[in-house]
Image: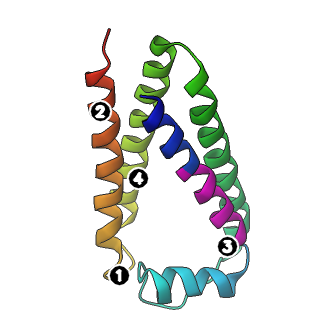
Amino acid sequence: MTSFLFWIGAYNIFGAIVTMTMSSEKLSDTILRKVTEIISEPYSHGPFGRMWLWMAASCNLFLGATMMLSTRWNTLAQQEVAFLCVVTYAILYAVMIMGGRKPKFGRGIHFTHVLWLGQMAWGIWVIITFIE
């Protein structure tokens, strides 16, 4: 359980840092279109893009820090944090499915399904394995 919470927490903190660096439209375009190929058309933030990026980064930072700090807590508290993270990932995955219908995404979008479902499966496995 602590391994899951630590590594997924670290992943969320890393994701928050990457999201913060994406304040630059040029860097965002490079990451989303050229490197990961998640989108197929040139990227721009739009009028509120930076605000949403910073909000997402802040939430990721909080979630990651909570997960990493919870590795010091008792097993029951860790299970609750892991459960809430799985629920959060399920909600975000549903948002991604609904929002991913349009515009046309690139071939890299398929990897995000594997990533999100893998995180949820790992979390569910950890919760079931460590039930007291």
Q: Mark 3 packing: few (<14 Cα in 10 Å), some, or many (20+)?
A: many
Q: Amino acid at mark 3?
A: Met
Give the number of the mark in front: 4 or 2: 2
**Which numbered disc, 4 or 1, marks the residue that appears first in the sequence?**
4
Q: Position of residue 62 (x, y in %)?
A: 67, 40
Reading the image, the residue beneath label 4 is: 95
Q: Is residue 32 left or right of residue 126?
A: right
The residue at the point 47 percent across, 30 percent down is 2
Q: Mark 4 packing: few (<14 Cα in 10 Å), some, or many (20+)?
A: few
Give the number of the mark in front: 2 or 1: 2
The residue at the point 55 percent across, 81 percent down is 31
Q: Is residue 1 left or right of residue 19?
A: left
Which element carries disc 1, helix, strand or loop? loop
Mark sitting on residue 23 = none
Check contact, mark 4 vs mark 1: CB within 8 A: no
Q: Amino acid at mark 1?
A: Lys
Mark sitting on residue 124 = 2
Give the number of the mark in front: 3 or 2: 2
Check contact, mark 1 vs mark 3: CB within 8 A: no
Which element carries disc 2, helix, strand or loop? helix
Which element carries disc 3, helix, strand or loop? loop
Q: CA distance from mark 4 to mark 1?
A: 16 Å
Q: CA distance from mark 4 to mark 2?
A: 20 Å
Reading the image, the residue beneath label 3 is: 22
74 lies above or below 36:
above
Q: Verify whether residue 49 appears in magenta.
A: no
